[in-house]
Amino acid sequence: MLQAPSGPDEDKGSGFKYGGWTLPYGDETTRKVFQKMMKPADLLLGRKTFDVFEGYWPKHADNWEGINDVTKYVFSKSRKKSDWKNTVFLKSLADIKKIKKSKGSALKIWGSSELIQLLLKNDLVDELWFGIYPLTLGKGKKLFGNGAIPAAFTLVESIVTTSGVIFVNYNRAGKVKTGTVGA
């Protein structure tokens, strides 16, 4: 589930009523994992996630080192400008591919469920971080849709918190391999 992890008013789309669902599971280990994931790097965001970030992070930059200084690439067909410094709007998948091929900073994606679907469908994901929480929420925005290509990943790191959250980090590892039980 990707929808509204940080607060009740973050994303009520499709009647989602569990905004802020991750917060009861926060502990010291969770804080350390997020510090690691939030190290300064350029961001690639979908427009809806960018709208949320733009309304919050410029005023709370003391909670995310470098957030106002990194480049924020925003995939949007409707927005063209922002007053938040270092924001660049992208209109096409070709724009994303061009940035990915450049020698710039690594790109991190936060939220952006529709953008992630597009990247997975076009084999543009090199690394994944998951937080697996001990609950089910039913309806809401999902990470994997029907368009994701088959792809293998290798575990880089796993961390279990005292509240039962499992954080895992995977790197892309080529094509899916299959086998036969008992062979």
Image (spheres, grey):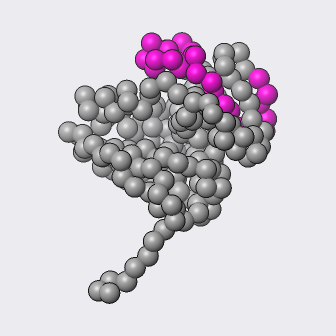
Query: Is residue 23 positioned above or below 114 on the image?
Result: above
Residue 9 drawn at (x, y percent): 52, 31
Task: Check if residue 160 falls in the magenta segment.
Answer: no
**Residue at 30 percent of width and 37 percent of height:** 25
Q: Is residue 147 visible?
A: yes
**Residue at 31 percent of width and 29 percent of height:** 32
Determine whether, in the image, residue 154 is placed left or right of residue 66.
left
The magenta stretch is 57-81
Residue 10 drawn at (x, y percent): 53, 32
Determine whether, in the image, residue 177 is placed left or right of residue 97.
left
Place residue 85 in its image quadrant.
top right
Q: Is residue 26 visible?
A: no
Residue 87 drawn at (x, y percent): 68, 23
Instruction: Point out the residue furthest to the front here.
Output: 103
Residue 15 or 110: which is nearer the viewer? 110
Instruction: Point out the residue furthest to the bottom here.
Output: 183
Query: Is residue 128 positioned above or below 35 on the image?
Result: below
